[in-house]
Amino acid sequence: MVIPELMEEVLEVSGRFVPLVMVLLSVTAAVLIFPLREQSVRLRSTINIGLAVIKVVLVALLVPPVVVEGVRPEFSTPFLPGLDLVLRVDPLALFFAGLSVLLWLLTTIYAVGYLEGKTHRSRFFGFFSLCVTATVGLSFSGNLITFLLFYELLTLVTYPLVAHWGNPASVRAARLYLRYALTGGLSVLVGVVWLTMHAGPVDFTEGGAEGVVELARQEPMQATVIFVMLVGGLAVKTAIFPLHGWLPAAMVAPAPVSALLHAVAVVKAGAFGIVRVIDDVYGVEAADSLGVLSPLLVMACVTVLFGSYVALRQQDLKRRLAYSTVSQVSYIVIGITLVDVIATAGGLAHLVHQGIMKITLFFCAGLFAEVLHVHQVSEMRGLGRRMPWTSAAFTVGAFGMIGLPPTAGFVSKWQLGQGALASEHPWVLLVLLASTLLNAAYFLPVVYTMWFHAPELDDEDGADGADAADGAESADAADGADSADDEADDEAEVAVREPKVLLIPTAVTAVLVVGVGLIASLPLSPWETARIIAEGVFG
Amino acid sequence: MSLTQSALGALVLLPLLVAAVTAVLPHTPRRTLGVGTALVLPVLLAPVLWSTAVDGDVVDLALGGYEPPLGIRLRADGLSAAFLTLSVVVGTAITAYAAVLPHSTGRRIVSPPTMQPEGPAGPGGGAQPEPAEQAAPADRPGVWRPGHPSFWPLWLACWSGLNAVFLSGDLFNTYVGLELVGMTAVALVALGGRSSWQAALRYLFVAVLGSLLLLIGIGLLVSITGTLDVLQAGAVLADAPEETRPAAVLALCLITVGMCLKVALVPFHTWLIPAHAGAPSAVSPLLSALVIKAPVFVLLRVWLWVVPAGEDLAVLTVVLSVMGAAAVVGGSVLALRQTHLKPLIAYSTVAQVGYWFLFAAMVGGSSSGSPEGLPGVDITEDDVVSSALVGTVAMALGHGLAKAAMFLAAGFLKDLYGTDEMDRLRGVGQHHPGLVMAMGLSAVGLAGLPISLSFSGKWMLTTSAVAAGHYWAVVVIVIGTILSAAYLVRAIAPLLVESEDEGTAVEVPEWQLEHASVLTQLPPLVLGLLTIVAGFGGALLGDLLTVGAPW
Amino acid sequence: MTEVVSTVQWYLILGTVVGIAGTVRLMLTRDLMARLVAMNVVGIGSLLVLLALGAAAPEIDPVLSALVITGLVITVAFTGVGAVLIRRIEGIEDTQEEAQEDAQEDPQEGREDEDGGERG
């Protein structure tokens, strides 16, 4: 009798510390990695990957109790007089944390291979780990102030990653990024302070925090202004038009960083924040009654179309992908602002689905650039034959982006469309259709070029020219010689060696793109989880 | 006399004693004694901090058993404990830095090599007792050597003075402690060699002027209340008859102006830039992190503990807060225009000083009408003032930690490369990852971004500004934050980027590189980390400051 | 009784005037020695004020006298430090050639002077 009770108590106590442990794990990684010498590759990779695996396992263990049984482990500590830092695990938190830690594990493996033989790797992986800290902390944040802390932390720790190469171009881009992100962060900060003044510490609650709902009823004007400040600030990271300028510029960063910024960390942090503000701070009903959702919906639609259109005109592969991100992330915002269960679920599911698809594409772009120095779409002729595995992964990702069945992209787009029809804004369906057409227009030609054009074997000059023009990957000089050797060896064959360390994570995500789409109807799949969360939001 | 009380006395007297001893010792034992003191002071701080923070008691000690008004009285309440902790922590870190890198303690003239057959002295390894005094620069051209042994007695005396100010329970002690700090600070600036003498002299004039104003103010208060004790004077003034009020207000004005001079509030800031930027590497962080905190502490004491708030202070509070706002904006803009690292950091101090004076608006605001009633939140006037106090103290402490780290790092680079011009220091950060990390961490603290103590401070300050209806203060804080982030990025980013033009790159003198050991990077790094970690202590600080609070 | 008060007031006014005069001189002059003297004048002015305040009470306040004495000691000490500094600074100006040599060694020098100029 005593022992089970004791066990229960132990579980309860330890459960409280689970979110804290999750955050501290990544801090530990950073603290361990920073002082490491450049040469200790094996030790660094072991720490990195080991801790990343532990985190994935922890999140996986948390899923059944939290999503199915409704347990809410919570940890809180006083921060300022009257304000607590709260870390709480709820399904939405777990949803985002799961995406982060899984993709982080893959990106870490990829980055280990990508950065082999380059400088400042301890710094890179140190900040990389701090980034995970921020993202995991963000997802587990139980109130607005905690969210704010991790949100700003994310800004600061991604700065050194964007500036990693240390050449003027990347420092300029990093500064631009910092300028955007800090200004946005400041707007969020002021909004949070203002809201906290009026509504006390704003705990994330499904259906809206008490004080905030009250405020929205009594002082709609103030509540609206605060909403605009919060969402306006978050929209910077979400790269909603016209606040998207930093994103294409940040493309100078190393490929794993681009993958991470675009698929998971920064833009998703913004989108996740918008979801939290609408669903758990104001509550959908209160936000809807303030009349702030429709303008946001329109902005998101404009961003979707604008991003797709600009992507169409980009010749640089990474920039094309960047604008595609601008457009795709706004799908999430569309889902939330349609005020409909299915649409919300679709938007949330897209949070995960888009992450997996986009990271696949960026991994591939990194591989192309690394192995063959291909940066421009025009240089991609015949890549299907030269790098078949990478090209296959790219194709899967691109199909996902377009939303072809049975990929994950199809699931979320379909549900978004259904939701749009059921909501008060059926015209959004047209936006979705138009965007799909545009997606196809900028991805299909790439895929076609890859598979159905003959490879140019003497493209070494062209690649070098592009390299010089680009300037971002100038640190690759040593590897350029490497790949030239490879090509000399393989002159007889067209195919080149695709580095395994880079290829494996890419393949895994590509499989996931299809897998997640196929298992969408199974319990605990991203889509089902998103549906449970959305039903919670709409009570 | 309990253990805690002895610790209280020792915190003031021990550094003073050691300073006196070191003044007559050769260089090497000076360093040893200095480090020894730095090791003992944290131990002495622990019981004081324990009884204030954990037990919530005010520690009280009448030196020699004489009671006020004539006795010397040390009191440690929450405010004292907070500032004392800063003094001990930063002081210890900088002592460690100066001990590891004697180069950083200044420049001195030694007699020409004929007098010194051993040839070039090591890093401050010369064993002449008083080389600075021996050398007469005018008639015998000496050779400039880095490192100045006078640093130790001066700094230890300064430390003692700081602790005396922070622990003083009566105004007379406060005055004497402040003078000790001022005098030694001037001398410490002068250690920087001839380029810093002008600055030191200017600093001296300002310091004396400020002290004299303080002295008159204290005299006025004594003549009204008949006592020097802070608590007694406060109690007398609270029930004082109407007709003594103008004198009390006049005293407050004089003390305030005097302290504004010493703390370099805009427009009295011009002396600070050459003094802080020109001082030796181990001295600049002391000046910026600790020395200017002493007058801030005195101001908080006098405003909150001694002279009761009243509507007749409205003009003064408005003037102060406007000057504060001007400092935040003006200081930041000027910092943006600097080309050298240390002046940039010095201007950042000018800007930070402004934040502490926004506090005045909250004190004034609380007396001119009740704070806005907000739905669901009951806020009294005391709440406004107390949260403004927590905010101001948090910002002051956060600034102390961050600025010490920043100045240490900048000074190190300047010593090593012989220049602190940002354009010429391009890319050098790659050789000192720890140092750049320290600068980055302290930049977060200085800009008041989360997570840092300054962020907590800004939060509290903003909260109380909104509660008191001073929305303009929020605007000032926001603008200040943006500008400070801008100039800090401007300061740090070039260190990470290689110069495009190879010709302008600086070279490291070989003989100096060997002293650029990992140990020297440790103090700034530790201070930088503390800036961040202390950000979680906002609630603790709030509790601590209620100990012995006037409300 | 009224006579005593008026005497005290005279001293107060005198002290204030001396103090303000000293302050004005301190801020306006560029000559370092003159500034040091002006600083002392301010000191004397403020001590006069303090003495007058001490005399205002029915019986002379010993605390205020103690303040005056401490103030005197500290002003003297500061004057000493100031004098040493001035002697050193003017020592530089006397040996011009040497200063020029040093200016090459120490680029801070010129900037320092500019700063001084701004304020004057």
Image: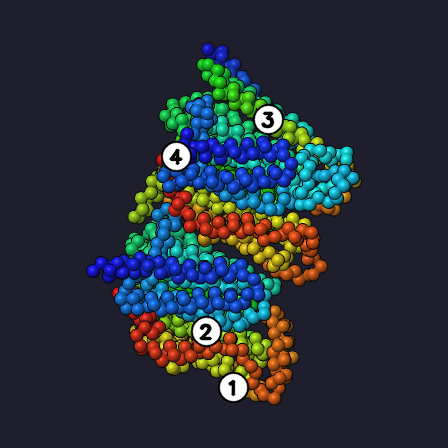
Let me know if marks 3 and 2 both belong to one chain.
Answer: no
Q: Are there few (<14), some (14-19), or many (20+) residues within 10 Å of tag 2?
A: many
Q: Residue A451 carries which label?
A: 1
Residue type of the residue flagged with mark 4: Val
* Label 2, label 1: how far apart the Cα atoms are: 20 Å
Specify the subunit that label 1 lies on: A
Measured as percent of width and height from the top left, residue B325 is found at 50, 43
Pointer 2 residue: A358
Asked if labels 4 and 1 touch by Cβ distance under 8 angstroms, the answer is no
* Label 3, label 4: how far apart the Cα atoms are: 34 Å
Mark 3 vs mark 1: in front: 3
Let me know if marks 3 and 4 both belong to one chain.
Answer: no
The kind of secondary structure element at disc 2 is helix
Q: In which quarter of the image is residue A527?
A: bottom left
* Label 2, label 4: how far apart the Cα atoms are: 60 Å
Pointer 3 residue: C75
Q: Residue B291 carries which label?
A: none
Residue B424 seen: yes
Q: Which residue is drawn at 50% across and 21% down?
A: C64
Q: Are there few (<14), some (14-19), or many (20+) residues within 10 Å of tag 4?
A: some
Pointer 4 residue: B58
Measured as percent of width and height from the top left, residue B313 is found at 43, 33
